[in-house]
Image (tube, grey):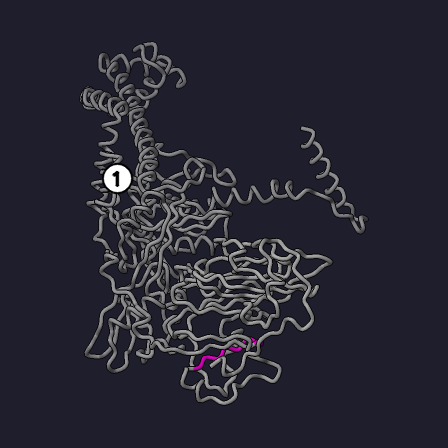
């Protein structure tokens, strides 16, 4: 209470300053950042999570739900289409957002856009395409919409108290908190949302398979859902590279990735390839850009031309091939290097009672069934109340049957209209509701036949009431009702699977080594960051190796053309590439400027490079602060084709030397520092770590601000009496260098050859 009072005082003080027209140079008000986050940022974050980005168990975000409910109240379920602008305007009564945001929401729900397996909005006009990045939809004044037939299953029971209704943002209208979907719509249509600190990405599944899986789960919660619902299904089709173990992990945890490939056909007579279906997560333009870049870089020389031939018949990307092209081999290459094969990352994050939860498929079905049972029970209770009320009124009407003349006489002899209902209540011992019902009967209907016909269904009504009460008290019968509805939905709206399942073992993958020539060569790196790649033959016949006047070659080694190349920089970054990505250079050429080739940061300089085919070996790094680290280069092996790794090594101090060691060797190394001290030691004296960012251990103690200056193999240095400098434990202080006792061996051009 004291803190709240203090906050109120601060707020009043701030208002007073802001409203004071004579206030000048107002000082800033100190406020703890924790309070600012709590007061301002946390409500925003919670609003985005709960009221915007994450779908709920009915399968909709608030923006979707408000839009569809508005269309339902406008009579667009089964009615004629209306202009999209009309729907957008009406939706703004529920959704306090701009018209363009609401229209964008509608576009994704339409049949014309093709984002959903089962669209909710029947559309007329141009709504763009899900598979196109650049194809824009028409303005809302030109397009027309109405609800699809499947929306009958979305709104069934909404007028029978199946879900809670709440006030809209200004309290003038009512809107549903959820929509009473009769099938698990949360799994049927793809849904993606990015909130604050979390996200949701739910793939779509085949409607018939989802209904069958729900029924199977109701019969046995431990059943194998993969048997009836083997994998997702996308509106854009494509081929899912299927792995049962991978899919089971996604079904169990709600997280994971799987790959989707494009579908294509080869026209050998015209020597071209036609791509007709692409992965859901990419676009035609992105694929064409990928392939164009591949052709420009010389990695797809088989392609003569590529064009987008998408028309009213659907998507089509045509690739013209050069004579003699192996089409299947080309496609495996394109799958490897372009978005023709893409991954879909699953994150089944759903709001349950206002709290976000990441759940597997079985858990989602369980939560949906819990919620659906409540909806069914509320609808049954609503019907039961209606039937009981009707029976109650008919019971009152039955009392009138005993003496119609008496009822007429009471009404005729009553002087005041307000006394009709009380007099009927006295005359027939009925309550006010029954008397009101009798009093409203038209004069022409006060006859024996009419009354007999009205009360003839009382026995059936009593039986229906008893049956409904039994249904409400029988979970087994409730489940049976849900299953019956699921079967009806599957039969009425089910569609054949669009995405084809292909076993991962059946797919051919691109093997770079099959098309890349392999040969021995020599790599050299200069101080200014130029990489020179020479074949052994050109190096043997070479004269002087050309470099800039102020540049020099500081390292070089032999390797294979198919090797991976790891380049370390002074900003603790690692750039991963392949030796074959660089063309052979002539001795008279400067070489490849790595800053441009690898898109390095401004001012970044290469310091060391490694070539490897198996990522075996040990990397030894010494730092200015006197520490040294030793860890396997396997730490840089990644499954993804990543070109840049940040934090490639310890960034707490400048690296002054790198040495690559074989896993079995333990050579003598030597370091020197700025105090003209040196130390000779075995590499194994520095313990082997596993992480690449390890800071290592202290090798030489830093005194008087001293720093390490050099690191080298002892064999590369002319040292008189090396045992004088040997240390056998760390940290050490080192030994002062004797005059002229250390001298670097000169590396000649012949040594490089």
The picture places residue 244, in percent across and down from the top left corner, at 26, 50
Residue placed at 40% from the left, 51% from the top? 192
Instruction: Read off the residue under disc 1.
Output: 214
Does the magenta-highlighted stretch encompass residue 237?
no
The picture places residue 753, in percent across and down from the top left corner, at 46, 81
Quadrant in which residue 218 is drawn: top left
The answer to whether residue 452 of the structure is visible from this angle is: no
Name the foreground residue: 484 vs 725.
Answer: 725
The number of numbered badges drawn on the structure is: 1
Name the foreground residue: 210 vs 95.
Answer: 210
- Say left or right for 603 vs 485: right
Quadrant in which residue 703 is drawn: bottom right
Q: Is 406 located above or below residue 441 in the figure?
A: above
Q: Is 414 located above or below residue 566 in the figure?
A: above
What span is in magenta? 527-534
Q: Is 341 located above or below residue 296 in the figure?
A: above
The picture places residue 155, in percent across and down from the top left corner, at 32, 41
Residue placed at 34% from the left, 34% from the top? 371
Name the foreground residue: 159 vs 699.
Answer: 699
Name the element at disc 1.
helix
Does the magenta-highlighted stretch encompass residue 531?
yes
The picture places residue 305, in percent across and down from the top left corner, at 32, 79
């Amino acid at each position: 209470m004291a803190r709240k009072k203090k906050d109120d005082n601060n707020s009043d003080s701030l208002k007073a300053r802001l409203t004071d027209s004579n206030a000048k140079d107002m000082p800033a008000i100190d406020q703890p950042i924790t309070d600012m986050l709590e007061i301002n940022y946390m409500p925003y974050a919670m609003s985005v999570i709960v009221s915007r980005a994450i779908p709920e168990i009915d399968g909709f975000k608030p923006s979707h739900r408000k839009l569809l409910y508005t269309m339902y109240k406008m009579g667009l379920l089964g009615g004629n289409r209306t202009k999209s602008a009309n729907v957008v305007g009406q939706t703004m009564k529920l959704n306090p957002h701009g018209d363009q945001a609401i229209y964008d929401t509608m576009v994704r729900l339409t049949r014309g856009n093709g984002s959903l397996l089962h669209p909710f909005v029947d559309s007329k006009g141009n709504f763009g395409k899900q598979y196109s990045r650049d194809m824009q939809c028409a303005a809302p004044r030109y397009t027309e919409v109405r609800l699809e037939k499947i929306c009958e299953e979305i709104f069934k029971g909404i007028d029978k108290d199946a879900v809670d209704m709440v006030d809209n943002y200004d309290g003038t209208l009512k809107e549903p908190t959820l929509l009473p979907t009769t099938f698990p719509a949360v799994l049927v249509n793809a849904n993606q949302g990015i909130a604050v600190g979390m996200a949701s990405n739910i793939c779509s599944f085949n409607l018939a398979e989802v209904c069958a899986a729900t029924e199977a789960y109701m019969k046995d919660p431990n059943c194998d859902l993969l048997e009836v619902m083997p994998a997702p299904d996308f509106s854009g089709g494509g081929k899912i590279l299927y792995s049962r173990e991978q899919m089971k992990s996604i079904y169990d945890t709600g997280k994971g990735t799987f790959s989707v490939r494009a579908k294509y056909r080869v026209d050998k007579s015209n020597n071209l390839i036609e791509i007709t279906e692409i992965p859901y997560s990419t676009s035609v333009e992105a694929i064409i850009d990928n392939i164009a870049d591949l052709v420009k870089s010389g990695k797809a020389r088989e392609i003569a031309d590529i064009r987008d031939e998408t028309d009213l018949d659907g998507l089509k990307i045509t690739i013209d091939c050069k004579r003699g092209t192996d089409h299947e081999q080309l496609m495996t290459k394109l799958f490897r290097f372009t978005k023709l094969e893409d991954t879909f990352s699953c994150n089944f994050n759903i709001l349950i009672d206002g709290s976000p939860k990441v759940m597997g498929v079985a858990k989602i079905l369980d939560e949906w069934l819990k919620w659906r049972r409540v909806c069914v029970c509320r609808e049954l209770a609503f019907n039961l109340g209606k039937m009981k009320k009707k029976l109650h009124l008919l019971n009152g009407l039955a009392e009138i049957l005993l003496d119609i003349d008496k009822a007429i006489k009471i009404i005729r002899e009553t002087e005041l209209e307000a006394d009709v209902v009380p007099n009927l209540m006295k005359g027939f011992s009925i309550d006010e509701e029954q008397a009101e019902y009798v009093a409203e009967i038209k004069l022409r209907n006060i006859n024996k036949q009419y009354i007999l016909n009205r009360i003839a269904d009382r026995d059936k009504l009593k039986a229906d009431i008893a049956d409904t009460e039994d249904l409400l008290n029988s979970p087994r019968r409730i489940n049976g009702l849900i299953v019956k509805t699921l079967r009806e939905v599957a039969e009425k709206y089910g569609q054949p699977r669009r995405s084809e399942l292909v076993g991962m073992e059946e797919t051919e993958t691109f093997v770079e080594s099959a098309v890349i020539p392999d040969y021995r060569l020599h790599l050299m790196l200069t101080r200014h960051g130029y990489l020179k790649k020479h074949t052994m033959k050109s190096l043997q016949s070479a004269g002087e190796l050309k470099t800039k006047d102020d540049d020099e070659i500081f390292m070089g080694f032999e390797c294979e053309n198919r090797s991976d190349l790891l380049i370390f920089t002074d900003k603790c970054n690692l750039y991963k590439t392949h030796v074959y990505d660089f063309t052979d250079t002539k001795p008279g050429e400067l070489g490849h400027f790595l800053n441009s080739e690898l898109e390095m940061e401004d001012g970044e300089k290469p310091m060391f490079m490694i070539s490897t085919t198996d990522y075996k070996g040990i990397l030894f790094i010494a730092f200015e602060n006197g520490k040294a680290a030793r860890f396997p280069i396997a730490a840089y092996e990644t499954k993804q084709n990543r070109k840049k790794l940040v934090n490639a090594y310890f960034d707490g101090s400048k690296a002054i030397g790198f040495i690559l060691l074989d896993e079995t060797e333990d050579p003598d190394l030597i370091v020197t520092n700025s105090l003209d001290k040196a130390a000779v030691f075995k590499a194994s004296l520095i313990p082997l770590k596993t992480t690449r960012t390890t800071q290592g251990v202290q090798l030489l103690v830093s005194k008087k601000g001293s720093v390490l200056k050099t690191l080298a193999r002892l064999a590369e240095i002319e040292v008189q009496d090396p045992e004088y400098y040997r240390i056998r434990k760390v940290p050490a202080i080192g030994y002062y260098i004797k005059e002229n006792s250390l001298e670097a061996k000169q590396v000649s051009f012949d040594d490089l050859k």
